[in-house]
């Protein structure tokens, strides 16, 4: 049911781990629904994401989307990282089964949550970044209706 | 091809079983030589008719039933649907209340939901922390207008075996019909419909090394139950459609093989099951056995591993050539984990990390060793990338 890319990122996930004294950390999802993602960012003085790590509790798609999201934002500026949407993650993975689309949303949300944490710590405002939802599944059910 | 496919370890026998070679052999002539329609008048038809009759007789004898009380169906789900819907319709004038449990198979639960939409009232009784139906709750749920109790014989996820004899006694005392979904129990455990006061029983061929697409419903003589499929005189006019002769022959053969080795196979499976339960418990920290330790199907092992999610575990096991199943939401296509694991009181996050392994008498202890080793490696790997485990270790360190 998963593409080869998804399986590759699930079996050999990139950037698993923690970053000590990370510039920003974001955790989204909840254990009740079966997936939690935590993203660590190391951002330098020029606003470039030097390193990105993740930890995920979840299904194969949750692990693969986390892995791909970290790959996509690594080395990018904050503004470019903001352009890494769930669609971009899905496309980079050659698609996801419909029931797993929420995993890519979670990955996008996790990046945003880590950036939000960075912005708060540094007292800055990142254009286009809204306070992440504490629970990724809020309002999601309606979306899944159609 | 994934690693280990050369020597696959199949531990999902509650999902389906390998058709026994003797069963395939017994079926083959009914495709190629004795392919006649049992309803036909010529001798080719009567050969098929005789084979169907013999299978029916044998199956009836295995549960203490009469020949004309066994109705062949397209499987366990059809038998469950039939038992509930047709009984509900036939007894509607007496009442529209049905009692079942919270841990039934979806073939029962979704049929109950359908009946609710048709104006029937269903009471879903609770189970205890091991998945055993609370008999006092069952008694208390019975009303004047209760027409049917449907309780599964043994659970497909956690293997818990229900006190069927006591349930049968309660049903009889209150003059309420009793149906049991025995899909996981038939041909694995001894069942006597008279001794247990069972009025209807569903079973499925492929759960005991018979073919897929065949099952049966036992209906006690005297029970009013409407026809489920209309159109012919097959199955005493209650289930129309040309008989699945090879399937019926195959299921009969599988039943013969199972019942002639019932205790022997049970012992073998228990040895494998108990070894697996013990070894997982010893080797892997933060795990929990789900279901009753004693009143348990001889083939069933169900563990929850904390801080990890079941689908990830299953995919990684598959890559190592091991087949299992999980009650995680991701394997059900919804956001909720297994209703059975929730009913026994597991929190969602622990239910998501469940793994069901169901053995067969043909498995080996060596396979169990390789399975435990593999699970151990995978669980360690998944925990190393789990934020829940990270948080737990951090809390523990404080």
Image (cartoon, coloured by chain):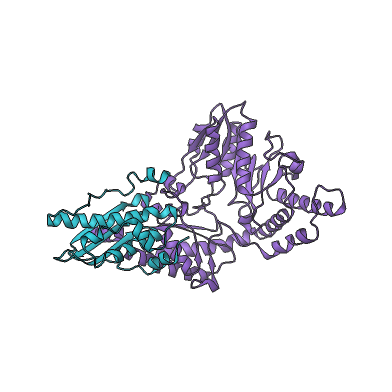
Residue B286 appears in the rendering: no
Give the x, y percent position of residue B188: 61, 55
Q: Is residue B8 above or below residue B94?
A: below
Q: Which of the pair A13/B267 is nearer the observer?
A: A13
Quarter of the C terminus of chain B within the rendering: bottom left
Indicate left or right for B235 with B80 as reference: right
Which shade is chain B? purple
Residue that appears at 50% across and 32% down:
B141
Residue furthest right as drawn = B42
Indicate left or right for B380 with B302 as reference: left
Q: Which of the pair B236/A10 is nearer the observer?
A: A10
Residue that appears at 46% across and 51% down:
B333
Indicate left or right for A62 with B79 as reference: left
- The chain drawn in cyan is A
Give the x, y percent position of residue B306: 36, 57
Res. A36 image quadrant: bottom left
Give the x, y percent position of residue B321: 50, 69
Residue furthest left as drawn = A123
Residue B74 appears in the rendering: yes
Give the x, y percent position of residue B390: 27, 61
Q: Is residue B97 above or below residue B39?
A: above
Q: Which of the pair B239/A69 is nearer the observer?
A: A69
Indicate left or right for A140 with A41 as reference: right
Q: Which of the pair A67/B284 is nearer the observer?
A: A67
């Amino acid at each position: 049911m998963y593409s080869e890319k998804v399986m590759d990122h699930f079996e050999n996930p990139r950037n698993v781990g923690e970053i000590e004294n990370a510039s920003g950390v974001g955790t989204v999802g909840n254990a009740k629904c079966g997936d939690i993602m935590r993203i660590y960012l190391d951002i330098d003085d020029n606003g470039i994401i030097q390193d990105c790590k993740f930890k995920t509790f979840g299904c194969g798609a949750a692990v693969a989307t986390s892995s791909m999201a970290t790959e996509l934002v690594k080395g990018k500026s904050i503004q470019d990282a903001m352009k890494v949407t769930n669609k971009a993650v899905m496309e980079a993975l050659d698609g996801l089964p419909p029931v797993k689309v929420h995993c890519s949303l979670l990955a996008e949300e996790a990046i945003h949550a880590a950036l939000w944490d960075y912005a708060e710590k540094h007292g800055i405002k990142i254009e286009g970044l809204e306070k992440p939802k504490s629970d990724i599944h809020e309002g999601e059910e309606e979306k899944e209706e159609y | 091809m994934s690693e280990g496919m050369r020597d696959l370890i199949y531990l999902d026998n509650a999902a389906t079983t390998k058709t026994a070679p003797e069963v395939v052999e017994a079926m083959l002539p009914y495709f190629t030589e004795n392919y006649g329609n049992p309803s036909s008048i010529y001798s080719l038809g009567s050969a098929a008719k005789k084979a169907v009759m013999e299978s029916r007789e044998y199956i009836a004898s295995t549960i203490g039933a009469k020949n004309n009380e066994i109705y062949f169906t397209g499987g366990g789900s059809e038998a469950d649907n039939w038992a509930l819907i047709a009984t509900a319709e036939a007894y509607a004038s007496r009442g529209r209340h049905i009692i079942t449990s919270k841990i039934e198979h979806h073939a029962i639960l979704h049929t109950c939901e359908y009946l609710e939409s048709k104006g029937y009232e269903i009471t879903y009784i609770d189970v205890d922390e091991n998945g055993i139906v609370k008999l006092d709750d069952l008694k208390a749920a019975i009303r004047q207008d209760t027409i049917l109790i449907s309780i599964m014989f043994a659970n497909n996820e956690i293997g818990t075996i229900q006190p069927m004899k006591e349930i049968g006694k309660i049903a009889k005392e209150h003059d309420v019909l009793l149906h049991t979904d025995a899909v996981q129990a038939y041909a694995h455990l001894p069942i006597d419909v008279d001794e247990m006061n069972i009025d209807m029983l569903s079973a499925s061929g492929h759960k005991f090394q018979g073919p897929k697409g065949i099952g049966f419903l036992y209906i006690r003589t005297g029970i009013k139950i409407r026809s489920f499929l209309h159109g012919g005189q097959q199955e005493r006019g209650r289930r129309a459609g040309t008989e699945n002769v090879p399937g019926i022959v195959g299921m009969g053969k599988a039943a013969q093989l199972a019942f002639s080795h019932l205790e022997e196979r049970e012992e073998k499976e228990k040895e494998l099951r108990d070894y697996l339960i013990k070894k997982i418990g010893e080797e892997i920290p933060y795990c929990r056995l789900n279901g009753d330790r004693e009143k348990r199907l001889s083939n069933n092992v169900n563990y929850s591993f904390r801080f990890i999610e079941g689908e990830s575990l299953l995919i990684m096991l598959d890559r190592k050539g091991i087949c299992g199943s999980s009650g995680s939401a991701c394997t059900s296509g919804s956001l909720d984990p297994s209703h059975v694991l929730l009913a026994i009181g597991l929190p969602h996050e622990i239910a998501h990390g469940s793994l069901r392994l169901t053995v067969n008498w043909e498995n080996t202890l060596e396979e169990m060793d390789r399975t435990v080793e593999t699970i151990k490696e995978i669980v360690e790997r998944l925990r190393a990338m789990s934020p829940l485990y990270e948080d737990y270790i951090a809390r523990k360190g404080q």
